[in-house]
């Protein structure tokens, strides 16, 4: 099946007994069993079933199965937020003394997380861009993971997955890819060598801005040598399922970063239109960015434009699409604020991946706690506006931005 057909019919998890076309919402805390012997086996992972929704829930499991199949992984674990997914994926493998190599231009919340990990003895080495040339000199015996956003948010730089994955695997290091802004419609990072893929499913997977969540997908391809990754000794016998099993039975389960059944249901509905929405979003983003190239006093950044330094990678991995985020520079903070205040259609909100076009001034919001150096590395300046494109008629968006710029 092709992409859109698979979204609806592949790995279908409706209720065969009652005939419901969507997975029901199992809005319960606990699940009863006919005997203590059966519940004992469920708790010991010796029998299928559900015991408590923090540990597992049928609605959440249906969402996890669909995402895993979509990304071509061997399993997925859903979390309460995108940041919870990033945190759980990293803490599943890291311990005190370990080092991470990551992009300096990461999403502000992720940079803050790496700062928090210092208290646990985990050090992060930042590179301006996750490339072989910048990463290789920083690799040591303590390097345990390379972490990157496939399309930086909001820098919009693109990682060459294949070359970085090759470098990582040559050094027996896994590559973790946050593919939130790329979406499964544009690329499946596992097919290019990523070992673990992470999504803030609050964004494009959900699509309507009505549920916070995150999801971790395991490729099953990395060999978690317990001599290097000490926590994997008891999971070594599980082979390719070691990472996902350790995650589900360890840090994720014990921290309690589980996804609510209602949010899993909303995500399952949203993902059915992911292909259609992303196609429209990318079209709108390209047309709007082409207009910005002609607008006086505006500098535009969008990977789908031929003028972008990342256009060749967009063609290689995304079929020429550039995603659904544009950043523009208005010339000054004052001009940026006036432009945003003049807009009639976009909402001023801190989210991406909605059906509605959203705008935000990153420097004064999501990067307000970052240093000036961190802001510059992330492509955030005082006059930067991030635009998350919606599915509106692009002619209306162009007209609205045109009048907003003319009336600054």
Image: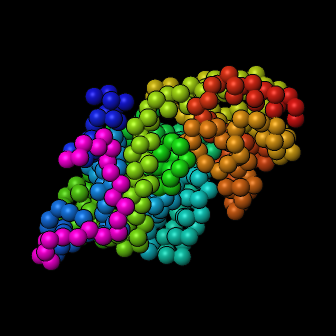
Residue found at x 88% / y 31%? 407
Residue 37 position by quadrant? bottom left
Asked if residue 220 is positioned above or below residue 159 in the image, the reply reads below
Would you say residue 146 is visible in this rendering? no
Quarter of the image with the C terminus is: top right
Compared across the picture, whether 76 is left or right of 146 comes to left
Asked if residue 47 is positioned above or below residue 340 in the image, the reply reads below
User: Relative to the observer, which residue lies in front, 398 or 321?
Assistant: 398
Q: Residue furthest front?
A: 18
Asked if residue 407 is positioned above or below residue 199 in the image, the reply reads above
User: Relative to the observer, which residue lies in front, 196 or 397?
Assistant: 397
Residue 343 in the image: state x and y as whole percent. 77, 36
Residue 314 in the image: state x and y as whole percent. 51, 30
Residue found at x 42% / y 56%? 262
Compared across the picture, whether 351 is left or right of 102 comes to right
Quarter of the image with the N terminus is: top left
Residue 379 in the image: state x and y as whole percent. 68, 45
Would you say residue 67 is visible in this rendering? yes
- Considering the whole magenta stretch, tell me its main secondary structure: loop
Question: Is residue 245 covered in magenta?
Answer: no
Residue 241 in the image: state x and y as whole percent. 23, 57
Residue 60 position by quadrant? bottom left
User: Relative to the observer, which residue lies in front, 37 or 86?
Assistant: 37
Question: Is residue 30 covered in magenta?
Answer: yes
Asked if residue 270 is positioned above or below residue 296 in the image, the reply reads below
Q: Which residues are magenta?
A: 17-38
Residue found at x 78% / y 26%? 402
């Amino acid at each position: 099946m092709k992409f859109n057909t698979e979204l609806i019919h592949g790995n279908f998890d409706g209720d065969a007994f009652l005939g419901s076309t969507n997975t029901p919402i199992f809005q319960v805390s606990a699940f009863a069993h006919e005997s203590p012997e059966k519940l004992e086996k469920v708790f010991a992972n010796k029998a299928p079933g559900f015991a408590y929704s923090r540990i597992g829930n049928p609605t959440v499991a249906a969402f996890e199965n669909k995402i895993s199949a979509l990304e071509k992984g061997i399993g997925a674990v859903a979390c309460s937020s995108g940041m919870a997914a990033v945190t759980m994926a990293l803490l599943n493998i890291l311990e005190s003394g370990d080092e991470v190599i990551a992009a300096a231009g990461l999403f502000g919340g992720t940079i803050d997380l790496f700062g928090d990990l210092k208290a646990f003895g985990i050090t992060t080495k930042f590179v301006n861009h996750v490339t072989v040339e910048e990463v290789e000199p920083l690799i040591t015996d303590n390097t345990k993971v390379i972490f990157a956003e496939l399309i930086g948010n909001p820098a919009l730089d693109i990682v060459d997955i294949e070359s970085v994955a090759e470098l990582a695997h040559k050094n027996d290091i896994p590559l973790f890819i946050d593919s939130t802004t790329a979406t499964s419609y544009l690329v499946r990072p596992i097919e290019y060598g990523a070992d673990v893929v992470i999504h803030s499913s609050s964004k494009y997977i959900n699509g309507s801005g009505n549920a916070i969540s995150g999801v971790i997908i395991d490729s099953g391809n990395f060999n978690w040598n317990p001599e290097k990754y000490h926590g994997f000794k008891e999971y070594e016998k599980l082979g390719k399922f070691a990472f996902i099993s350790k995650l589900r039975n360890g840090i994720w389960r014990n921290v309690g970063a589980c996804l609510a059944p209602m949010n899993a249901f909303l995500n399952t509905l949203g993902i059915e239109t992911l292909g259609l929405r992303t196609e429209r979003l990318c079209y709108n983003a390209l047309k709007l960015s082409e207009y910005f190239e002609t607008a006086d006093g505006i500098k535009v950044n969008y990977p789908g434009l031929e003028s972008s330094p990342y256009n060749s990678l967009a063609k290689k991995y995304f079929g020429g699409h550039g995603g659904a985020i544009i950043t523009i520079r208005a010339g000054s903070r004052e001009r940026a604020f006036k432009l945003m205040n003049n807009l009639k259609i976009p909402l001023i909100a801190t989210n991406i991946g909605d059906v509605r076009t959203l705008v935000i001034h990153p420097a004064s919001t999501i990067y307000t706690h970052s240093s000036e150096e961190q802001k510059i590395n992330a492509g955030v300046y005082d006059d930067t506006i991030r635009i998350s494109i919606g599915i509106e008629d692009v002619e209306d968006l162009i007209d609205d931005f045109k009048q907003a710029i003319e009336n600054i």
